[in-house]
Amino acid sequence: MAIYLNSNIITNTSNSVQEAMEPFLYKGIDFNITSKENQKALKAYKDAIDKIYRSVNAKDEDTIILNSSANESTSAIFLSIYLKYILTGRKNSIIISHRASEDELKVAKFLESQGCRVHTIPITADGTIDVSLLKEYLTNKTALVSLALVDEESGVIQPIEEICQTCALLEVPLYINAKDAIGRIPLDIQRDKVSFLSFCSDNIEGPKDIAALYIASDAIEIMPTVFGSDTEQAGLRASIKDVAKVIGFGKALEEATDALDFEIEDIRELRDELEEALLKIDGSYSLAPWAIRVPTVSIFAFEGIHASMLLDKLAKKDISAYSFAIFNNKNFERVSLIDIASLDSSLKHSIIGFSLSINTTREDIEETIKAVTQAVEEIREYGDICKEIK
Amino acid sequence: MSKISVIPQVRDNFKIDSLVNRPQNIGTINEEEAKKLDAKLHTFSYGSCQGGLKLNIYWAVNNEDRVVDCKIIPYGESELVAVASIAGLVTKNKTPQEILNLKEKGIEYFLRENPNNSALPDSLKFLTNITIDALYKCANSYLKEVDNDEIVDISTGTTKNFIKDSIKRFNITTLKELIKYTRAGAYDKSCQYEGAGEKRSNYYLDDLLKETLNEIEQEKKGNTTLSDKPFKQMETKEKRIAIEAVIDKHIRHMLIMDGGDMEILDIKTNGENTDIYIRYLGACNGCASASTGTLFAIEGILKQKLDGDIRVVPL
């Protein structure tokens, strides 16, 4: 059986979600035509939208539009902020963090080339942003603060309450990417008042290529990403959505938020077991503090082991892990976890992460521990790469 | 942008797969093992772990200056294990001078599953490129040649000559491509262009690229200009240009009028004589007068315009 420990990147669609989607798959559903089948679909669709609202505790006045990915939400927010506020001269800067993901960085770079000021907030030694510094960066000319609630690589949770309060002081819109937070930690939009929030279905065992963008009722106005009829998705992204996918997304969100009560503690236990075992390997480091990390993620660096080689060895045994440190991923612009933890920079390419999901079993973890220990030994058998020879 | 940019760039090659699983020539050689082979140990370290790619090379070299055994420890993308295996294979039983004549294509062809498709995806082509550079540097260090190469990117240890060679080898025209094929500037942006960051070396990639592209252009120009020397003192390259010029001006239009053409295959200097081997194309191929009248006409014109000792041989 294949073992999936890369739920940060992608997950399989779970069986219950597949069952919920089944009746509506491959159907051409037009809600304007009131056939029996379409009305059944409409009921399920409404139900799914309800679930999506409930998953983040959104109010009925708020808008949640569905798009294809969290990246799309990021681009949509950045570009509409630029077109509506920066180009017109009302605001002049945006704030991102030193650990911004590639999609955020790329669009921020583009805005910078168009004359917008882009400030990056430094990261403290535990991986969270420095909120006192955020206060200093904020002015009444700041158009947007954009942060990931949970770091996609290390799983470190940002102090959202403090950030929300800080931004509220100057009424600066706050965009939170909750891609890696949904289904890992409880989200409550009514408590933490953000303007925009995005999350997706890829890493909660839902269907792929569907995501949601939450827009608070009191948030500033944004531009449509796809122009079209006002009756579809509040006119912000007018395109036909696959009904089956929306229903699947709703089901996956429901399951993920339900699991937060109980199952997540089991996952945390398994994760800790994995972490304890892997830290026994010579020259292994854990890169993020336990207390402020989501319960699913465990991230390591192994001395003298290139992440790509280790991933390859694990893939041979049908185990999927993830690494952002290999050349193919090309995300070198942000600060490395090694630098944040102030370890030796020769570990920069040795970072490998494991992120568990609800379906991970104890056997999976035992097998993974065995496989990783063996793979590390195998690679170290090649010779001591760290030794400098003349 | 093209079809290649919409396909995921990952390994899809059986040969590399099997070499990654069962690597060869990977490991170390110690002094004792070298002694058993009646050879001396030579070691060399290329790249760095910080730069994401490192090769520790061990050679056992006998008294005839031949590398009898080669072992490499790779650190990098998993495909590097396969590349290093082949690198070890091709260096065996070669002298360091011969290794300096190896080409990047040599390793790459070895890894191909299908002769028409390149072995590695676009995003990993730098692996063979960097490995061959490591072999050159290792050979140079064995020959104790004064290395006047200068480091451009400190984080990856990429040198100036390597960057210039790569530009020529892969016909690189943009900075993005240069970073892809050499990895210089991938981690440390400061060496990409002036103003990208704190200055740490004497060169910027941007300047090097412009300089090399200029050099290539000038070389091309130099190749097509006629030499002023008398025909007999010319080098083969210059002779070819002179002959092509005469053919273009006086001969080719005659042949094309009859639906034919010709091409020069080779030029050889045989003592006093210069033999020009040609091939007829189109209607000339198989024509009865191709070996008589036409041939004499071509030879006559070349003799008259260039040198009396020219002979034309149709193949």
Image (tube, coloured by chain):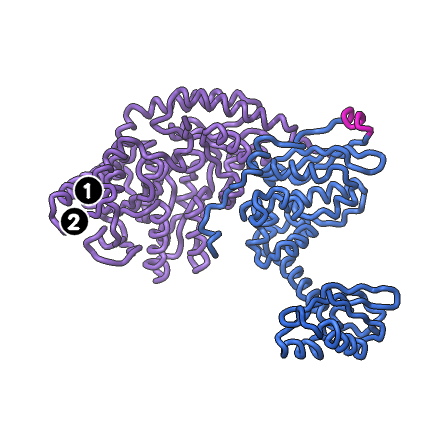
Chain colours: A purple, B blue
Callout 2: chain: A
Query: Which mark is drawn over residue A8?
Result: none
Give the vertical position of A167 relative to B215 (above or below). Answer: above
**A69 left or right of B252?**
left
Q: Quadrant of the N terminus of chain A?
A: top left
What residue is drawn where x is 31% and y is 24%? A263
Write down the residue under mark 2: A31
- Are the residues at dot 1 and dot 2 in contact (C-beta closer than 8 Å)? yes
Residue drawn 66% across and 65% down? B217
What whole-number distance in Å separates the C-alpha atoms at marks 1 and 2? Answer: 10 Å
Looking at this view, name the residue that lies furthest to the front: B288
Asked whether A296 falls inside the magenta stretch, the response is: no
Q: Is residue B36 magenta?
A: yes
Quadrant hosting residue A254: top left
Q: In the image, what residue occupies the spot 23% across and 55% down?
A: A235
Which residue is denoted by mark 1 in the rendering?
Answer: A45
Q: Magenta span covers which residues?
A: B31-38
* Circle 1 crowding by C-alpha within 10 Å: few under 14, some 14–19, many from 20: some
Q: Nearer the viewer, residue B139 or A331?
A: B139
Q: Is residue B286 visible?
A: yes
Horizontally, is B276 left or right of A324 in the view?
right
Whether labels 1 and 2 share one chain:
yes
Can you give x and y, in whole percent of width and height, for residue B303 in the image? 81, 76
- Above-or-below relation of A350 to A80: above
Chain that bears disc 1 = A
Query: What is the magenta segment's predominant secondary structure?
Result: helix
